[in-house]
Image (tube, helix red, strand yellow):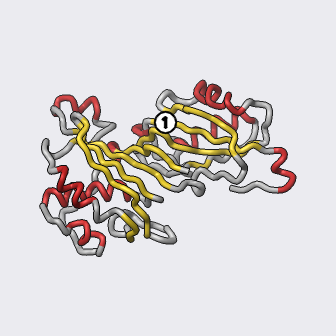
Amino acid sequence: MVVTGMLCRRCRNVKIVLSYDGSCYNGWQKQKNTENTIQGILEKNLSKILGEKVKVIGSGRTDTGVHAFRQVANFVTRNLSIPVDRFKVILNGGLPKDIRVLSSEEVPLSFNSRFSAKFRKYVYFMFLGDEKFFPFVRNYAYLALKKEYDIDFIRFLSKDFVGEHDFKFVSSPGSYKSTVRFVKSIKVFRLKDLLVFSITANGFMYKMARGIVSVLIEGEKRKDPDFVKKVLSGCKINGLSLVPPNGLYLHRVYY
């Protein structure tokens, strides 16, 4: 969104960083059939605070059940009476407790949280601990099918995802103009009872992050060193299932 002319002198572009638990929401993006989305709730609260209709732009459209540590969003307002750093306090006073605004600041009118982003990082958590504790973390991690994984082999497989590739066979392409994305890095490590996948790319398509994790897990299971290459080339893979959304988090957005 770029605002020019006389309108520029009467508007502010406000950037907010927020964290949310996506367990109870139908994703980020506002929908016609439900008001239960992060974007919809933010717009409703901001419109009430500012006395005008507000459109909130998010850096990424997290899906149903997906969480965010540091989602970035922005909105343009003609209301100049509220100090920009007060939006954090005012919004947190009216938002549900599972959505928190971490900061608010004024940015140039040319800033767009989605299109100005250079890279995004998602992390995925798999729970490897005692199953009796899983009921307490079930909304925030995927229960692994086994307790031990060959992490070195998963790292070896992940190298074939790094770089520029067509990810149409690893995601749900939908109406994207291009299915080519550049993956900057993939890191896989054990953190106590969690197996963590950290994926940084210039953009993510629908289900792409979960698709990458699913392929790596299946490749480790099959001990096939060429598994990722086969998937990217479009080879038909039987028995490949998608990991659930509850373990996925938008971790950080880079500008």
Q: Is residue 33 above or below residue 104?
A: below
Identity of the residue drawn at 27% across and 29% down: 136
Q: Residue 16 lies in what quarter of the image? A: top right
Q: Is residue 133 above or below residue 76?
A: above
Identity of the residue drawn at 50% across and 33% down: 99
Q: Nearer the viewer, residue 62 or 124?
A: 124
Give the secondary structure at mark 1: strand
Q: Is residue 19 left or right of residue 228?
A: right
Could you say where residue 92 lies in the image, as x and y percent from the top left? 58, 27
Could you say where residue 232 lies in the image, as x and y percent from the top left? 30, 70
Identity of the residue drawn at 21% across and 35% down: 193
Q: Residue 231 lies in what quarter of the image? A: bottom left
Q: Is residue 124 left or right of residue 99?
A: left
- Dot 1 alpha-carbon crowd within 10 angstroms: few under 14, some 14 to 19, many 20 or more: some
Could you say where residue 102 lies in the image, as x and y percent from the top left? 55, 32
Which quadrant of the figure contains the N terminus? bottom right
Q: Amino acid at mark 1?
A: Ser
Could you say where residue 89 lies in the image, as x and y percent from the top left? 62, 26
Q: Residue 153 lies in what quarter of the image? A: bottom left
Identity of the residue drawn at 21% across and 55% down: 154
Q: How many discs mark residues in the rendered view?
A: 1
Residue wearing tag 1: 19
